[in-house]
Amino acid sequence: MNISVLGTGYVGLVTGVCLSEIGHDVTCIDIDQDKINKMSVGISPIFEPGLNELMLTNINKGRLHFTADHHQGLADKDIIYIAVETPQKEDGSADLRFIVRAAKDIVCHIKKDVIVVIKSTVPVGTNKFIKELILDNLTKDIKVDIISNPEFLREGSAINDTFYGDRIVIGSENESAASILEEVYKPFRVPVFKTDIYSAEMIKYASNAFLAAKISFINEMAHICDKVGANIDDVAKGMGQDKRIGPDFLSAGIGYGGSCFPKDTQALVKMAEDIQYKPIITKAAIEVNECQQTLLVEKAKKYFGNLLGKRLALLGLTYKPNTDDVRGSPAIPISKQLLKESAEIIAYDPAGIGKARTILPSRIQYAGSLDEALLNADLAFLLTEWNEVTGSLLRKACQLMKEPIIFDGRNCFSLDEVRKLNIEYHSIGRPP
Ligand code: UGA
């Protein structure tokens, strides 16, 4: 198939690269010429394990191309993916500016019948709206089908998720267009679920809201464990053995972050409120998450009395390990609150410092290594469970900190282990 992908963010680039890997001829389009120049020689603008290698292989095989020229990228394709961002507007709703622009570009440049596949996360009704926009503006005699094909990949394991995902959702009004897309994905060997367009759009929001609620639920249980002396890790294990509950997404911690769960839950709330429905569970999941993100600061204040002038090693700035993405990271509200408490922050992250500098408050100092962050620190906050950090943190905390005092926002260590090392250790929903 001759395919193009509009937008080279996480979803667009990974989709384009993986489609080329299974043999399709793929052109990725972006308006940023500098980004295009780099990607054309195999340099990925995002940190994603395995992506650079796959890009290089497929560029060299001549089936992965990059362009900022929309005519060249769109004119004669069989399938065009829209994978542009849908950022959050101030009222919580999804900003559809970039999708609309992509649709207008398609109208301008297509020369033959085409299937337009919307991968971006969009409110229910958007696919149909985009279809009407394209058909209303099209002056040529061309057939355009629209398919809603939401994305379920996770940053940090995006390639694996594309090749071995749980399902591919195809929402369409046209059975033959849906079958063509099903055929495109055949080499992935991922189960395909075909449905109507509205349901496909809704599956994406419902899935992310459910996962966010699962995390907030376990975090709520962790609060109760903290008060009654139970251990949330054991509680989650015991719950997860029930097949109806399942063991995944039950890790208590400082709450979910990233560019998806926070934005998509807010957009779902807005979508529901627009139809006069109060989405009680989704709103509660958001509220629990907001409280969760500052829990470590409360615990440290309780332990020290106040944090005035305390030298604090802030370990992990990305919203989860194996990514350089700091968007929506719990490190943002936590660092703001720590500065309000007049703590001195020395931050370290294996991959996220570059992006953190543009997002976190400017008064934070950055360390070039874990050792530098820990040296003479009064306390350490562990925010992201990077292997590079957790592998040596306990030993280094004993060697380098004034006294080893750790507040662990991800429950990375066993209580036996820290007790043996005489570390003052506070975690989430487990006895001190
Ligand atoms: C999430 C979904 O998992 C993907 O299926 C979806 O495609 C994606 O959003 C999206 O909408 O694009 P992602 O944001 O990359 O993917 O990351 P996750 O691995 O889901 O983690 C999200 C957040 O939840 C992280 O901050 C993580 O630390 C936190 N989390 C996750 C927990 O606090 N506890 C858990 O048990 C699991």
Image: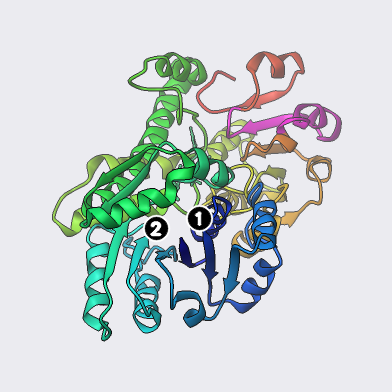
Task: Give above or below for 416 relative to 131.
Answer: above
At mark 2, the secondary structure is: loop
In front: 124, or 404? 124
Extent of the magenta region: 390-411
x and y, in percent, of residue 192 in the image: 35, 41
Circle 2 residues within 10 Å: few <14, some 14–19, many ≥20: many
Query: In the displayed structure, does residue 1 sit left or right of residue 389?
Result: left
x and y, in percent, of residue 39 in the image: 65, 67
Amino acid at circle 1: Thr
Circle 1 residues within 10 Å: few <14, some 14–19, many ≥20: many
x and y, in percent, of residue 120 in the image: 39, 59
Task: Give above or below for 297 relative to 44.
Answer: above
Amino acid at circle 2: Lys
In front: 331, or 28? 28
| Residue found 31% across the figure and 51% down from its top | 179
| Residue found 34% across the figure and 80% down from its top | 107
At mark 1, the secondary structure is: helix
Extreme-right residue of the structure: 399
Tell me the tag on residue 15.
1
x and y, in percent, of residue 317 in the image: 63, 48
Q: Are marks 2 and 1 in contact (CB under 8 Å)?
A: yes
| Residue found 26% across the figure and 64% down from its top | 126
| Among the 4 quarters of the image, the one containing residue 415 | top right
Q: Which residue is mark 2?
A: 119
Q: Could you tell me if residue 268 is visible in this image? A: no
| Among the 4 quarters of the image, the one containing residue 76 | bottom left
In front: 123, or 304? 123
Q: Quadrant of the C terminus?
A: top right
| Residue found 56% across the figure and 33% down from its top | 299
Tell me the tag on residue 177.
none
